[in-house]
Amino acid sequence: MMLSSMTLSRKYVILGIAVAGLIGSLTSAGAQIQYQTGQNVAPVYEGWMHNDDGSIDMVFGYLNRNWEEVLSVPIGPENNVQPGGPDRGQPTIFVPRRFTQPPGERREQCVFRVRVPAGWGPKQEIAWTLTAHGRTDKAVGTLDPLDEIDTHVIAENRAFTITEGNKPPSIQSLKADPDTVTLPGTVTLTARVTDDGLPKPPAPQPGSGNAGGRGNAAAASSAVAALAFMGDASLDCR
């Protein structure tokens, strides 16, 4: 009888472990579901930055939780920044992850800034409220000292290498054709994008060591992306 009891108990233990493993697998699978459409867009407060004139920029980004769906949320009750809004320069087009983002990063970082005057109180707030697919989310920005950022912090968060003397890329608008447009017409903008070439591309890697082997040099390249911010756009790089 004692042997039978021990065997029965062992069976229950094994069964319990199997059930727990199954539940764990289901939980893990549920956590890894990638929704192509139907999900919300979460606004994100990135932090705040000092300006030379004493004013302050409150910086915001967002996360489109969909892997494929591009959402359009017009300025208004469902896309509203206050105080001073509803329009404070926030986007109305929300895209999924782009090729220019660091690997594993789906959030659109530092998309727009809301400028507040010098003397803005540490407890005063800028709130961005966004509703998508029936869900309302809000990002609230304050001047918490822990939220202060600068260009180096932004670069590090985007997995860029910090190089002394490195300047951000610049864009020069050359012409608009036509000069004026009436919606729903379109306008073609021509611009020149330049960069200082920093950081320098990495040195060629040693070859495999075989006779006649060749080193593998990392190609230095620049990427230009057009982000649909408040309307549809296309990009032709030459």
Image (cartoon, rainbow, N blue to C red):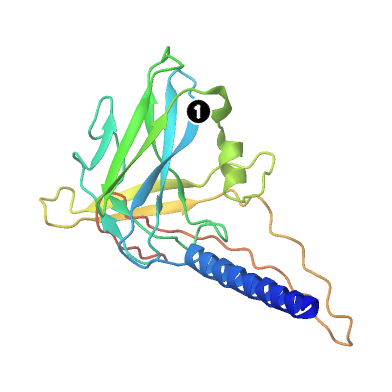
Q: Point out the image quarter for the C terminus.
A: bottom left
- 216 left or right of 195? right
Q: Three-letter amino acid code at disc 1? A: Met
Residue 83, above or below 224? above
Residue 166, above or below 114? below
What percent of the width, then of the height, locates residue 26? 52, 69
Q: Residue furthest front?
A: 1
Would you call the spot at circle 1 few (<14 residues within 10 Å), some (14-19), or many (20 or more)?
some
The residue lying toward the viewer, choosing from 18 and 228, is 18
Q: Quadrant of residue 232?
A: bottom left
Q: Point out the image quarter for the N terminus.
A: bottom right
The residue lying toward the viewer, choosing from 14 and 232, is 14
Q: Quadrant of residue 13?
A: bottom right
Q: Secondary structure at mark 1?
A: strand
Q: Residue furthest bottom?
A: 211
The residue lying toward the viewer, choosing from 95 and 54, is 95
- 236 left or right of 46? left
Residue 231, above or below 10? above
Residue, x 40% and y 57% (percent of image)? 65
- 131 left or right of 55? left
What percent of the width, then of the height, locates residue 55? 43, 19
Q: Which residue carries the number 1 mark?
A: 49
Residue, x 37% and y 22% (percent of image)? 116
- 159 left or right of 179? right
Residue, x 39% and y 60% (percent of image)? 96
Residue, x 54% and y 60% (percent of image)? 222
What percent of the width, then of the height, locates residue 172? 40, 46
What percent of the width, then of the height, locates residue 85? 24, 30
